[in-house]
Amino acid sequence: MEEVNSAFVGDDGQVGGIGGPVTSPKTPSVKHEIDYSTATKRPQIGAALAAAFSAFLLGTTLGWSSPVQPQLQHIAAGSFYPNDKQLANIWHIELDDNQMSWVGSLLNIGAMIGALSGGLLMDKFGRRFVLMMMTAPYIIGWLMISLAVDSSMLYVGRVVVGFSGGVCTAITPCYIGEISTPTMRGIVGFFFTFNLSCGVLVTSVMGLWMHWRWLSVICTIKPIIFLVGMICVPESPYFLMRKGQQSEAFGSLVWLRGSTYNNIKAELHQIETRIFEDSKETCKISDVCQPWVFKPVLIGVVLMLLQQFSGLNALSFNAAEIFRLANFSFDRLIGVVLINVAQVSAVVFSSVVLVKRLNRRTLFIISEGIACLSMLLMGVYFHYSGRPHSQEMVIFKWIPLIAMVVFSSAIGLGLGALPWLISSEILPPRFRGPGSSIVAFTNFAMSFTVTKTFVVMNRVMTHAGVFWFYSGACFLGIMFGLYLLPETKDRTPLQIQVYFRSREKPISSLPILTPK
């Protein structure tokens, strides 16, 4: 068990911690520990769920391409099409493999642009306001997809909805982190991945029986629900204090913490202290070279690299195709639904049980280990099934489904949520906007890379080689979690920044704070 420690400031102004005081003039100060036990949990959960519904919208966008692929590539005129043959020809769309790959991957191009824009927009206009405004491009993009008459309209629509998803992805984890208390951050931090998984699941289930155009129409309506939810919750207290709106920040904290919470002024003073420290120097791009910015941003970038190169989105986008390659014996779309159900179930179990009992690092290592073994098993299956005289492999046809279910469970346990949660916790407040953009951009850039190159990698490396590659990436993730990933559970933002501004300790020695 690691030594328990909490950073503090004594009467002499020195920041204390393991190994004595840290006297760096740039180290932020913490006047005293705040007792968050009297804060009401329900408002924080409500606000986090409202913001995290943006991840549900992104999940419907990510999950759309897999169930509609058979319809777009082997479509037959059905009841949706009008009786007039000329109109039926206008509505008819049939895509080849290359066009379908662009439909799946162009989402990430829009998301990359949105991710770069999200950090700047949220620092200028506010977290809540920008999230609300993203409903407009979501609706416009889905309308273009619903009414598409050729592949180009599908392309543009996917880029537009991807842009909204990228902006929301850069902002939502920061908003959730800023409105929640340290002891609640782990639970509400999983809301993002829970909603993302639910969005994918709902879309895959509807895709079993619904025409792709009607599915797109329903996706057009969902952003309105998100808008209504965000209208009912307050802006981030940190952003309001940065803009000098003390009374609004006070009201926001009262809404979020409840009337029984008696540390509103103390928490506002803590936020004010952070803002004062941040305002001593103007935010510059050159700050990326400073260790207190470079280290947390680099950790966030590495976490996103490890997440995507585990095969997360590559397998999600191509699940039906993988089952086809494995000669899956029943409806491949049912297999897609099963792996999505497994992921949602794992997210619920992790957020309700594991996140309270396990440290961030432990949960990350466990999920990476499970993902590593499942991808290794997939590689072994394809290695032997591709050999001559492999008829005996017929009895092992269940292996791809089991491996995919186990892999999706690993994503739900932590590999999906923790990179976003940890990044939002460790990014310095003064560089949170640009830092969030860099981290989110990395995620979508790598997602585009792995999804677009999945077919090429299968051709060059063989099916087995691709899954072994993903397994190797998961093994690197285990090593990163063991030796380089800091532990942030139950630590306040100031304590995390005290650590990163101190040059006395290696990154792996970040202590655990015991909640009050």
Image (tube, rainbow, N blue to C red):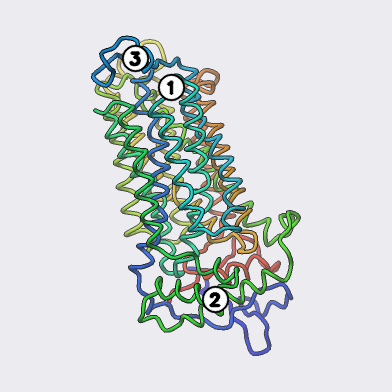
Left/right of residue 196 with respect to residue 15 in the rendered view? left
Which residue carries the number 3 mark? 87
Inter-mark Cα distance, 3 to 2:
59 Å
Please tell me whether mark 2 sits on a helix, a strand or a loop. Answer: helix
Please tell me whether mark 3 sits on a helix, a strand or a loop. Answer: helix
Q: Residue at x 55, y 66 (%)?
A: 239
Mark 1 or 3 closer to N-term?
Answer: 3
Callout in the foreground (1, 3): 3
Q: Residue furthest bottom?
A: 11
Q: Amino acid at mark 1?
A: His
Is 332 placed above or below 108 here? above
Q: Residue at x 73, y 59 (%)?
A: 290
**Callout 3 environment at 10 Å: few (<14), some (14 to 19), or many (20+)?**
few
Q: Amino acid at mark 3?
A: Leu
Callout in the foreground (1, 2): 2
Inter-mark Cα distance, 1 to 2:
63 Å
Q: Amino acid at mark 2?
A: Gln
| Residue 89 image-quadrant placement | top left
Which residue carries the number 2 mark? 246
Which residue carries the number 1 mark? 383
In percent of width and height, residue 165 lies at 48, 43
